[in-house]
Image (cartoon, grey):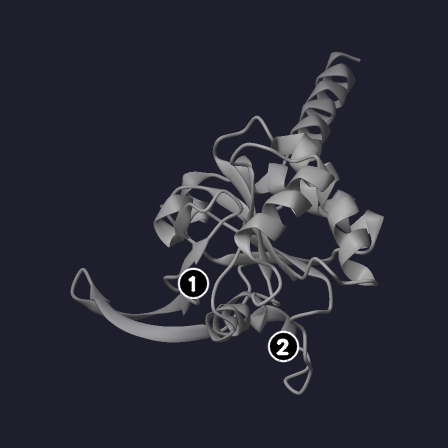
């Protein structure tokens, strides 16, 4: 009888530990094999794509570069303020992400306008006010159209891998980026269920062990 109870307790502890284990998020995007020497032995490792340097201006007319995101988890998307279709839906859903993490200084949202001619800094500020966002959690970024489209290729590479001939910059994707500026998830911003998953994945990423996070 005692052995039976011991077995039950062990099983309960195992199941409890299993239920509390978070599955690590995959690292997405293009991968490059890198050969190096470790302890005198030649090994091949995988180097994952990262978001390259950039320079834009936010709704407060502050210059924002990749350095402003060092050590932070963030979500990126692409929009324009006069969009009559998916953008309003996307950003209504993004508000749920904003409200969940607005008090976390280690998290950011960055939304790149793809219509810089119309979406000037004052226009972006009015758009932010209409959304009800304030502070530095969510930046609306303005820059040269060519620079925006160039950076979009880096953010959306994990999506374009599935269909290289597709055009994705205005397809409503939210892109989850880790502290090392690697792509860790893509989500359809118009789908509330996908956004709920994004929130859960952000929490998983925040709890990710150092050895997985690549520190």
Up/down of 89 relative to 155, above or below = above
Please tell me how many numbered marks the rendered image carries.
2
Within 10 angstroms of label 2, few (less than 14), some, or many (20 or more) residues?
some
Q: Is residue 88 left or right of residue 26?
A: right
Residue 160 circle label = 2
Which residue appears at 73% of the width and 49% of the height?
91
Question: Quick check: can you spot residue 21?
Answer: yes
What is the quadrant of the N terminus in the image? top right
What is the quadrant of the C terminus in the image? top left
Q: CA distance from mark 2 to mark 1?
A: 15 Å
Residue 50 circle label = 1
Question: Quick check: can you spot residue 201?
Answer: no
Within 10 angstroms of label 1, few (less than 14), some, or many (20 or more) residues?
some
Residue 57 x %, y %: 45, 53
Residue 82 x %, y %: 74, 61
Q: Nearer the viewer, residue 128 or 139?
A: 128
Which tag, 2 or 1, sits closer to the chain's start?
Answer: 1
Residue 93 x %, y %: 77, 46
Up/down of 93 relative to 132, above or below = below
């Amino acid at each position: 009888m005692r052995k039976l109870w011991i077995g039950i307790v062990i099983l309960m502890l195992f199941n409890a530990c299993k239920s509390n284990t978070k599955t690590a998020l995959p690292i997405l995007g293009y991968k490059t094999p890198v050969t190096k020497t470790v302890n005198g032995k030649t090994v091949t490792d995988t180097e994952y794509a990262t978001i390259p340097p950039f320079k834009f201006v936010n709704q407060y007319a502050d210059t924002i570069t990749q350095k402003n995101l060092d050590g932070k988890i963030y979500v990126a998307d692409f929009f324009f303020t006069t969009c009559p279709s998916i953008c309003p839906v996307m950003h209504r859903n993004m508000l749920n992400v904003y409200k969940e993490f607005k008090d976390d200084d280690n998290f950011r949202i960055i939304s790149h306008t793809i219509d810089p001619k119309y979406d000037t800094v004052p226009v972006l500020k009015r758009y932010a006010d209409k959304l009800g966002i304030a502070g530095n959690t969510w930046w609306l970024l303005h820059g040269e159209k060519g620079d925006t489209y160039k950076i979009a290729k880096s953010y959306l590479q994990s999506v374009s891998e599935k269909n290289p001939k597709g055009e994705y910059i205005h397809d409503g994707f939210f892109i989850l980026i880790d502290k090392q500026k690697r792509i860790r998830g893509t989500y359809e911003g118009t789908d509330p269920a996908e956004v709920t998953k994004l929130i859960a994945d952000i929490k998983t990423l925040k709890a990710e062990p150092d050895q997985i996070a690549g520190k």
